[in-house]
Amino acid sequence: MKDFKILIMVLSPFLFGFIALFLGAYGINAKDVIKILLNETLHVFHIEDTPQKAIVLDIRLPRIILAGLVGAALSGSGVTLQGIFRNPLIDPFILGISAGAAFGCAICVGFLNFIPIQLMAFIFSLLAVIISYNIAKGQGEVSRLPLILSGVIVSAFFTALVSIIKFLVDPHRLQAIVFWLMGSFSLSDWDSVKIAGVGIGLSLIPIFFMRWRLNVLSLGYEEAKALGINVKLERLLFIGFSTLAVSVATSLTGIIGWVGLMVPHLVRMIIGPDHRILVPLSFFAGGSFMIAADTISRTLTSFDIPVGIITSISGAPFFIYLLKRGGKEVWGR
Amino acid sequence: MGKIVLRVKELYFRHRNNGSDILKGISFFVSSESITTILGPNGSGKTTIFKCLAGIWKYSKGCIEVHDKPIERLDLRERSRLFSLVPQEHEPAFPYTVFEVVLMGRAPFIGLFSSPKKRDIETANEALRLLSIEHLRDALYTNISGGERQLTLIARAIAQEAPIMLLDEPTSHLDLKNQIAVLKKIRKIAKERNITVLMTLHDPNLSNLFSDKVVVIDSGRKIAEGRPFDILNEELIKKVYDLDVRMLSLNGKRFLAPILDS
């Protein structure tokens, strides 16, 4: 039964991705989509370069792959941060990582176009999470409520800085910043897939190999130390890698909240808290969640609704549900 | 009792931002394959000694030697191969299974980019067998009783394969029956595995029953050290706990009974 659940979760992003290829504002019938795909993979049919072909291969496909990668990044970083801070109520959005990345990107878009946007996003998101961490840190241990509160403070601070930039920047760029902040995959292309593949791969692969340590780190500062773990160093490594994943994702698609909170939670409810399985499944489930959310956002209406709105609409009630159900399981000691 | 395994010399400890010394020059030694208990009132520094031994806190002065070698230079991983620490039973952040908790005892042997291998899993299973809790293997640690949790944490320490086991008040959250059961188990595995045990206890009678040696401390200082039979008496309890007790003998064992109306 457990193996079956694992299999379903691993296959789901590929299944959702495949289905999503057939859906979209521009109606292309299923037979043509299959023809285009077969032509591209097996070279059985010869197809002219039509708009349909461009839509499937250069608009829908990169968008789906990007959504999968970004979903994996957000969910993977959520599960990592929840593990090291032994706090099931946090994610990159709550800790201010997303807001920090947004500020870094807004500076680039608004003023300093010559600096790589991913670099600025990474620097400021790392700054944000380190500030949150240090505000909340007591004697080695990071308590739950203080961490959430310090994340709120840091988020609010960086969001205010973004507002200043919005206020100062010229109106053309303002529109770009505002739209991008809402979180959307509408500008996806193969270049962004390449950047995401490299950046997110470089951060999720080490997290995958280090994942068992999260079990030990989640025991808390003193116990992990007594088990021979260099807690400070390993926490920093995990924070660094998960921040890299989120900053790359944010720089490409804007702020997409709540995914990093919801998906690891759902996976943990289904499969248990052992990070050896939880971490890789969170990658896959995050990918499939994001592909599904993005497909809904681009097919629900004739507009391309920013996907960040969809995830926030589903995330807020989920958070309330956790709090209400919570008690000891959520807040612990 | 064999040769000296652990020697603590003139240990001082104070918190970084808090003036007064918590340990004020504690010295004692522990012989191999024996059970030593540290007795003392709340706040006397028992847990602090353990945290210094396990490397969780850094002591300000003094020296700890294992097999006549100072261990100050060792990093946490090397230290965790000498000392296994059994904390007081507690609720973890996530509902791990008993087996997953025990497997975490293998952390000192598993590299940063690695996961437990077959041998680690075998060692964890063996630790479960040794504690006779194989039937709890797949139970959730959060759903079992306090006594079972304590046994799980001891199994984790066994999986750690360290020669010296530190137990921080292993009986504090347990009912009387479980207190005795856990202590008997500790005595049994210490013997079977040739492990040197150092534990803190609250009850002088339990340390009398279950240990080869007692170290009595109060306010960060050592008051007495020796065989329980030799040192646990009415004066010592009066001195350390400010409590009147009467010593009773039963089957060659001595017990200390509090006197309520003096």
Image (spheres, coloured by chain):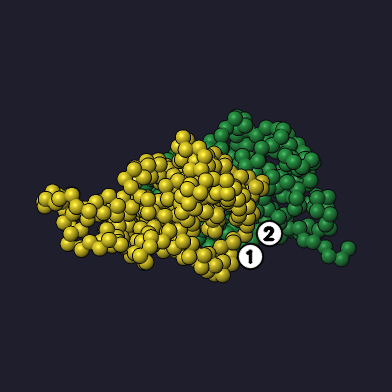
Residue ID at (47%, 56%): A182
Residues beneath discs 1 and 2 located on the same chain: yes
In the image, taking residue B68 as reference, residue A117 lies left or right, namely: left
Residue furthest to the right in view is B262
Q: Residue A23: image x %, image y %?
A: 28, 62
Q: Label 1 crowding class (10 Å Cα cut-off): few <14, some 14-19, many 20+?
A: few
Residue ID at (45%, 37%): A116
For this rendering, which residue is in front, B27 or B145?
B145
For this rendering, which residue is in front, A173 or A131?
A173
Which mark is in front, 1 or 2? 1
- Could you tell me if residue B82 is visible in this image? no
In the image, what residue type sits under mark 1? Asp
Q: Residue B44: image x %, image y %?
A: 75, 48
Q: Colour of chain A?
A: yellow
Which quadrant holds the C terminus of chain B? bottom right
Q: Residue B63: image x %, image y %?
A: 67, 32
In the image, what residue type sits under mark 2? Asn
Residue B175 is marked as 1
Which quadrant holds the N terminus of chain B? top right
Q: Secondary structure at mark 1?
A: loop
- Determine the chain carrying the residue at label 2: B
Residue ID at (13%, 48%): A43
Residue A282 is marked as none
In the image, taking residue B258 as reference, residue B4 lies left or right, namely: left
Q: Colour of chain B?
A: green
Q: Secondary structure at mark 2?
A: loop
Residue picked out by circle 2: B251
Residue ID at (67%, 50%): B200
Q: Using the image, determine if residue A204 lies above or below residue B96.
A: above
- Determine the chain carrying the residue at label 1: B
Q: Residue A179: image x %, image y %?
A: 46, 54
- Could you tell me if residue A130 is visible in this image? yes
